[in-house]
C-alpha cells in the first residue's frame, strides 16, 4: 500500500511506515504520528461546525416551506451533500487516531463511496447554483419559463446520478484488508492497473472538482457582473463583491488540495523520487485536505446565511424556538422582548429566499 494517495488521502498518509522503492525504504512514521495527533481535533471541529450550519439550512428551508423555488431546491440538496460527507468523518477520525480500521469490509466500502458521493454532489450542486444565478439574472425571461419545480427536481436527480457515477470507483475498489498486520481501509485495484487507476482518479478529481466549477463560475459570474453593471440597483456593488468572495473562497479552499493531490500521484513524473520531497508532499496533503473539506462549513454561510430573507427566517426561528426556551432558565434575558419578537413572523408574501441578490 505505501503512503500513496488513498482515501481519504490524509487519513491514509503514513498508514504504512515505509514507501518501498528500488532503493532504500522511505520512513514516514513522523508524518503518520503528526496526522494522528492533529487531524482528529481538526476534523472534529469541521464535523461540529458543518453539522450545525447545514442542519440549520435544512430546518429553515423545510419549516418555512420554501422548496417551491428552484434555487432553494438546490440549496436543500447542497446541505444534504455536505451532511453525507460529514456523516463519514467520525469513522475517519477514529481511523486516523488509532491507525487501524475496525469497522469491517462492508462499512469500509460503503463509507468510502458515501464520502466521495457527498464530495462530488457538493461540487455539482455549487455548479447548479451558479448556473441558476446566471439564468435568473442574465436570461430572466427565459428563466421564468424554465426554472420550475419540475425542472429543479429533475436536474437534482440527474446531479445525484452523476455524483454516484463519479464515486463509483470508490464503491467498487475500497475494502478492508491487512497491511503489516493491521486492518486498513484502502483501495485494491486490479493487478497491473494500479497506476492507471490512480492517475485516472486524481485527474477525475482535478477536472470535476476544480477545473469544471472554476470554468463555470468564470463564465457565469462574468455574465452576471456585466448585467449588474447595466442595472441601476444600489445593491449591485454588494452583489458583485459577494460574487468575487464566492469565487475566491472556492479557489483558496480547493486549489491547493488538488495541486498537491496531482503532485503526489505524479511525483515520479514531475521530479525524481526523493524521500524528503515525498514527506513534504504527505505533510502538504494533511494541511490542504483539511482546508478543502472545511468548505462544507462555509457553504451554509455563503449560499444561505448571507441572504437577507434567510436571515429574517433564522432570527424568527431563533427567537421562537431557542431564545424563549433559554429565557425560562436564564433570568436576565428580556422575556417580554423575546415573546414579542417570536410573535412577528416573516413575510409570507416573499417568493424566494434571497441567496445573493
Image (spheres, grey):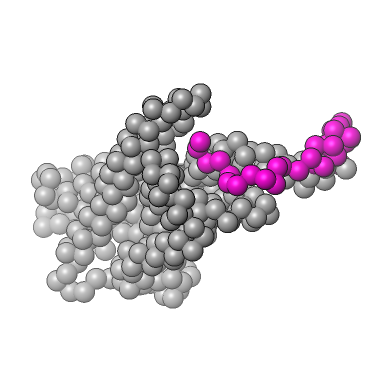
Q: Residue at x 51, y 36 (%)?
A: 357
| Quarter occupied by residue 191 | bottom left
Q: Quadrant of the N terminus?
A: bottom left
* Side of 38 where 258 appears, left or right: left
Q: Is residue 208 above or below residue 231?
A: below
Q: Residue at x 28, y 49 (%)?
A: 212
185 vs 238, nearest the viewer: 238
* Side of 282 where 47 appears, left or right: right
- Name the main secondary structure of what is drawn in magenta: loop
Q: Residue at x 72, y 45 (%)?
A: 317
What percent of the width, then of the height, locates residue 108? 42, 69
165 vs 52, nearest the viewer: 165
What percent of the width, then of the height, locates residue 184? 38, 66
Check residue 103 for magenta coloring: no
Can residue 249 be seen?
Answer: no
Q: Residue at x 77, y 47 (%)?
A: 321
Can residue 342 be seen?
Answer: yes
What percent of the width, then of the height, locates residue 177? 35, 72
Q: Is residue 181 above or below residue 290?
A: below
Check residue 341 for magenta coloring: yes
Which residue range is magenta in the image? 329-357
Q: Is residue 260 above or below residue 177?
A: above
* Side of 275 where 50 appears, left or right: right
326 vs 302, nearest the viewer: 302
3 vs 301, nearest the viewer: 301
* Side of 280 where 37 appears, left or right: right
What percent of the width, then of the height, locates residue 66? 61, 53
The number of discs equals 0
Amino acid at each position: 500500500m505505501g503512503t500513496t494517495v488513498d482515501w481519504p488521502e490524509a487519513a491514509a498518509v503514513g498508514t504504512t511506515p515505509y514507501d518501498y522503492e528500488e532503493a532504500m525504504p522511505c520512513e514516514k512514521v513522523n508524518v503518520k504520528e503528526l496526522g494522528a495527533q492533529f487531524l482528529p481535533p481538526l476534523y472534529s471541529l469541521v464535523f461540529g461546525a458543518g453539522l450545525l450550519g447545514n442542519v440549520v439550512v435544512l430546518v429553515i428551508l423545510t419549516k418555512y416551506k420554501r422548496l417551491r423555488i428552484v434555487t432553494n431546491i438546490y440549496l436543500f440538496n447542497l446541505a444534504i451533500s455536505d451532511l453525507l460527507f460529514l456523516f463519514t468523518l467520525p469513522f475517519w477520525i477514529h481511523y486516523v487516531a488509532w491507525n487501524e480500521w475496525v469497522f469491517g469490509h462492508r462499512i469500509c466500502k460503503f463509507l468510502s463511496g458515501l464520502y466521495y458521493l457527498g464530495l462530488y454532489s457538493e461540487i455539482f450542486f455549487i455548479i447548479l447554483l451558479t448556473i441558476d444565478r446566471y439564468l435568473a439574472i442574465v436570461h430572466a425571461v427565459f428563466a421564468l419559463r424554465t426554472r420550475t419545480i419540475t425542472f429543479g427536481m429533475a436536474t437534482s436527480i440527474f446531479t445525484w446520478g452523476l455524483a454516484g457515477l463519479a464515486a463509483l470507483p470508490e464503491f467498487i475498489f475500497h475494502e478492508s484488508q491487512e497491511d503489516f498486520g493491521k486492518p486498513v481501509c484502502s483501495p485494491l485495484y486490479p493487478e497491473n492497473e494500479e497506476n492507471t487507476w490512480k492517475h485516472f482518479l486524481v485527474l477525475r478529481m482535478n477536472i470535476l472538482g476544480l477545473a469544471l466549477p472554476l470554468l463555470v463560475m468564470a463564465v457565469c459570474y462574468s455574465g452576471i457582473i456585466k448585467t449588474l453593471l447595466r442595472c441601476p440597483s444600489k445593491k449591485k456593488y454588494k452583489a458583485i463583491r459577494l460574487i468575487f468572495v464566492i469565487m475566491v473562497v472556492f479557489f483558496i479552499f480547493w486549489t491547493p488540495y488538488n495541486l498537491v493531490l496531482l503532485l503526489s500521484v505524479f511525483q515520479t513524473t514531475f521530479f525524481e523520487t526523493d524521500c524528503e520531497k515525498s514527506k513534504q508532499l504527505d505533510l502538504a496533503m494533511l494541511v490542504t485536505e483539511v482546508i478543502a473539506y472545511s468548505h462544507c462549513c462555509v457553504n451554509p454561510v455563503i449560499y444561505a446565511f448571507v441572504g437577507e430573507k434567510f436571515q429574517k427566517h433564522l432570527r424568527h426561528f431563533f427567537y421562537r424556538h431557542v431564545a424563549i426556551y433559554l429565557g425560562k432558565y436564564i433570568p436576565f434575558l428580556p422575556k417580554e422582548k423575546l415573546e414579542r419578537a417570536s410573535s412577528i413572523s416573516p413575510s409570507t408574501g416573499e417568493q424566494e429566499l434571497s441567496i445573493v441578490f
